[in-house]
Amino acid sequence: MEQCKYLKENYEACFNVWFSERFLKGETDDSMCANLLKVYTKCVEKAIKEQNIELKDVEVDHLETDKEIPHS
């Protein structure tokens, strides 16, 4: 999902500013970065579709099953 990297970085930068300069000072309105998150999320969703990744496969819990990757 290399194509989304720049969008992720922009969102994270905005989030860090919101968190440190607003949230930690008591302001809980998180709409400041909402548009950046929306664009980033759409990019990730598109990349997931293009790679034919099924979200249900990502959400499956493999711990303590025969699908868990053995530790060497």
Image (cartoon, rainbow, N blue to C red):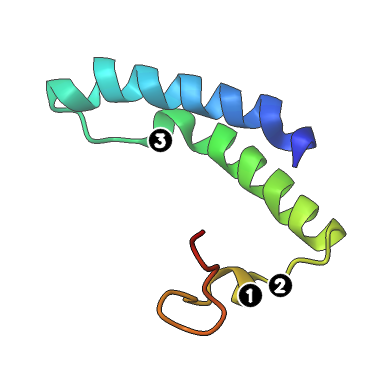
Give yes or no for contact between labels 1 and 2 (Cβ–Cβ under 8 Å).
yes
Position above or below: 28 against 50: above
Q: Residue at coordinates 64% horizontally, 70% vertically from top-left?
A: 55
Q: Whole-percent x and y of residue 64?
A: 40, 79
- Identified by mark 1, the residue type is Asp
Q: CA distance from mark 3 to mark 2?
A: 29 Å
Q: Which residue is mark 2?
A: 54
Tell me residue 67's x, y (percent).
57, 79
42 sits left or right of 50 in the view:
left
In the depicted view, which residue is nearer to us: 14 or 28? 14
| Residue sitting at x 52%, y 73% | 68
Circle 3 residue: 31
**Where is residue 21 drawn, in percent x and y?**
26, 15
Q: Which residue is mark 1?
A: 57
First of labels 1, 3 by sequence position? 3
Residue 13 pos. (x, y %): 48, 19
Q: From what the image shows, is residue 1 above or below residue 7? A: below
Q: Secondary structure at mark 1?
A: helix
Q: Is residue 60 above or below residue 24?
A: below
Location of residue 41 with respect to 71 vertically, above or below: above
Q: Amino acid at mark 3?
A: Ser
- The amino acid pointed to by label 2 is Glu
Front residue of 59 and 24: 59
**Among the 4 quarters of the image, the one containing residue 5:** top right
